[in-house]
Amino acid sequence: MRVAEAGLLTIAVLGLRLLLHGARRPSLGQGALMAVGGYTTALLAARHGVAGAATLPAAAAAGAAGALLVALPAARLAPRYLALPSLGLALALPALLAGFAPVRLPHGESALAAAALAWGCAGALLAAAIVLRRRVAQAPWPAVAALAGALAGLAGGLLVLQQGAASAALFPARLSLLLAAAAAGPGGPPGAVAGGFAVVYLPDLVGLERHGPGPSTVAFGVLLVLAAMLAPAARRLRR
Amino acid sequence: MSGAAAQIASGLAGGVVYGLLALAVVLGHRATGVVNLAVGAQATLSAYVCAALVGHGWALWPAAGATVALSFAGGIAVHALLVRPLQRGQLVEATLLSAGLLLVFAGLAAWIWGGATRPFPQAFAAGPATIAGQTVERRDLLDLGVGLAAAAAVWLALARTRAGLGLRAAAASPLGARYLGVPVRGLTTAAWGLAAAVAAVAGLLAASRLGLQPALLRSALLAALAAAAAGGLDSAGAAVPAGLALGVGLELAGRHVHWLHGGVRPALALAVLAFGLAGRRR
């Protein structure tokens, strides 16, 4: 159910956009924070019998806590250094989780319910982001990092609800970098929708089926390079 | 071979790869202030290029030399065309650019050569060697020797040449160096090229140990960033020793500590990265 996936990735991209364009802190670990939220959902549902959607606040809280923990080592450094501990988490967490068996939910959501839930959350959060744009722009950066982590955790929880299980393969290191590429482009909060759809559908467009993940990885890399090269000019234009 | 000496030798041979990648990160960071996150993916691409040259009938050593030279030229092109225009302000975009290049290089390797592991031509025959009564794998020692020779070459270039002196002056005080007539722009670009060449050596060593695969240096990138952070990201002298220490530490932890279902290596490397960054001055 790929439309649901685009919805939940929109949420993750939205959080990262606030951190990247608002607070100007580059995080390359949002996919790993999705895994933190996803495993929170899976463990609460499988081991403690919490009903599916009721786990999502805990998934968001876990994502926020993870984001603060990642931000801690780079807290005193210049903004760009957030890229280091966050990329470190993106590289380490999939390797860490690979040793553990997947955690299966007792009963999955129907495809339609998963899509409705993902797009309902995405719509509400997009509206909130547009209304509260000024507030978020003035917030201290650790608060924005925690917010971005919470949205990533929520997205991870939604992904696990949709897939019916949490596994290391669901959150590869690549996902963190693809999210950064999807978030780096222009367009304000609505641009997050384009980013969410890009992560899901760009691999189809450039022929993932025939050539493996190589072409789409290059395409995302080129997008990120272009976004970085054009960002100074885009900022000058907005002023 | 699983004696303590053999394990330490294997750790050192792996660690010299981390050390060289960390040295590449430090060289780039000192010259530009940008942490080049693409070093691992670029080094992997370099290893594929070397294997392709050998596939076209080149002997291994000339192919390796040509690969290092090509990587140097590639590093210069990347800095001149992409990094230099972004070299102002907080360098957030330049850091994102390096993450984009990581994707481009990793994607290109997977696209052109496929995802399966391929054999890499071997420079040294495998076999045991005995040092002071301890049996170790001979190739580990030779890998270590090649890596240390590359690091020594970089040290000579930085410490004993005019260009190296200018580069260190530019890192200490860019404006002051420019007023004294040091060609700061050109040297900064050359440093990025030198870093790419060092990374290529790391890629060749890793490929000869593990075979060619697109994710060849993914875990090594984490260890290399940790080793670079342990030296404060600016210490070229600390990069290689930190990489060697981390290589031995990760090798021994991977073999003897069985927590976390085998995930103790990435956890340890991540902890070193976090504490290294937290302890950095400024």
Image (spheres, coloured by chain):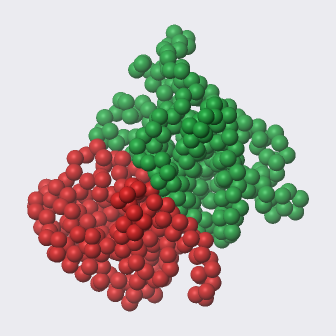
Chain colours: A red, B green
**Residue sitting at 56 percent across and 41 percent down?**
B52
**Residue sitting at 30 percent across and 49 percent down?**
A97
- Where is residue B227 shown, x and y percent of the image? 55, 44
**Residue sitting at 29 percent across and 57 percent down?**
A170
Q: Quadrant of the N terminus of chain B?
A: top left
- Residue at the front extreme, as displayed: B56
Would residue A155 appear left or right of B243 to someone viewing this image? left
**Observer-nearest residue: A107 or A51?**
A107
Would residue A172 appear left or right of B276 to someone viewing this image? left
- Where is residue B186 shown, x and y percent of the image? 79, 57
Position of residue B69 relative to residue A62, above or below, is above
Question: Is residue B75 visible from the viewing direction of this image?
Answer: yes
Position of residue A73 relative to residue B237, above or below, is below
Would residue A51 appear left or right of A197 to someone viewing this image? left
- Where is residue B169 shown, x and y percent of the image? 80, 53
Question: Is residue B21 visible from the viewing direction of this image?
Answer: no
- Residue at the top extreme, as displayed: B133
User: Exactly how many numbered labels are in the figure?
Assistant: 0
**Residue sitting at 47 percent across and 83 percent down?**
A187
Q: Quadrant of the C terminus of chain B?
A: bottom right
- Where is residue B137 shown, x and y percent of the image? 50, 20
Position of residue B16 relative to residue B45, above or below, is above
Task: Residue B187: name its quadrant.
Answer: bottom right
Position of residue A206 relative to residue B71, above or below, is below
